[in-house]
Amino acid sequence: MNNVYVLIIEVNKNINVNVGALGNLNFEKGIYAYVGSAKKGLNKRIERHLKKGKPTFWHIDYLLNDGSVKVLKVFTVQEFFSECEVAKIISERGFPMQGFGSSDCKCLSHLFKIRKYQFLRGFMQELQLFCGSELHG
């Protein structure tokens, strides 16, 4: 079973990022939720996401390497929810960045622009997700 996590990401200004095979994507200023997973080494995966200037391997690396982007919070998900199940629920209220982070599944996306942060907070509580400590910087 994969360990699933959700990164809450702030984009501080409108930016255009070359996301590898997806090409140049526009990201509006605002809050995004990215759903990911790790078969093992969840903490190491999350630590990697928090570093700037890392080699680009996943779609999310391209976005997180931008100086206008920072991770605000990390949620880890109880084991009985899959990455795609969490992404599907967020997709019902978030706006998907088509194809982002979902090249190995049938989901429309694993990155969503969130217009109402209260929805996301409520969703996390409703599914009894564990909220990691708030991140700064």
Image (tube, grey):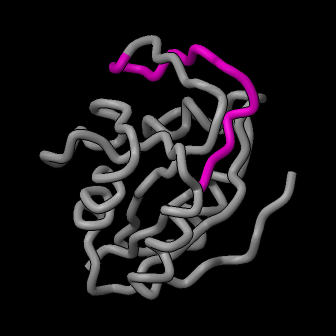
Task: Give left or right: position of 68 versus 94.
Answer: right
Above or below residue 131? Residue 69 is above
Q: Could you tell me residue 107's position as x and y percent?
A: 19, 46
Please give the range of residues in magenta: 8-22
Whether residue 79 is visible to the viewer of this picture, yes or no, is: yes
Observer-nearest of 22 and 31: 31
Q: Residue furthest right?
A: 137
Residue 116 magenta: no
Whether residue 41 is visible to the viewer of this picture, yes or no, is: no
Observer-nearest of 71 and 49: 71
The quadrant the N terminus occupies is bottom left
Residue occupying the point 43% across, 43% down: 112
Residue occupying the point 27% across, 86% down: 80
Q: Could you tell me residue 60's position as x and y percent?
A: 50, 40
Say which quarter of the image contains residue 67. Answer: top right
Task: Give left or right: position of 10 versus 117.
Answer: right
Above or below residue 100? Residue 80 is below
Observer-nearest of 107 and 93: 93
Above or below residue 92? Residue 66 is above
Q: Could you tell me residue 97's position as x and y percent?
A: 37, 32
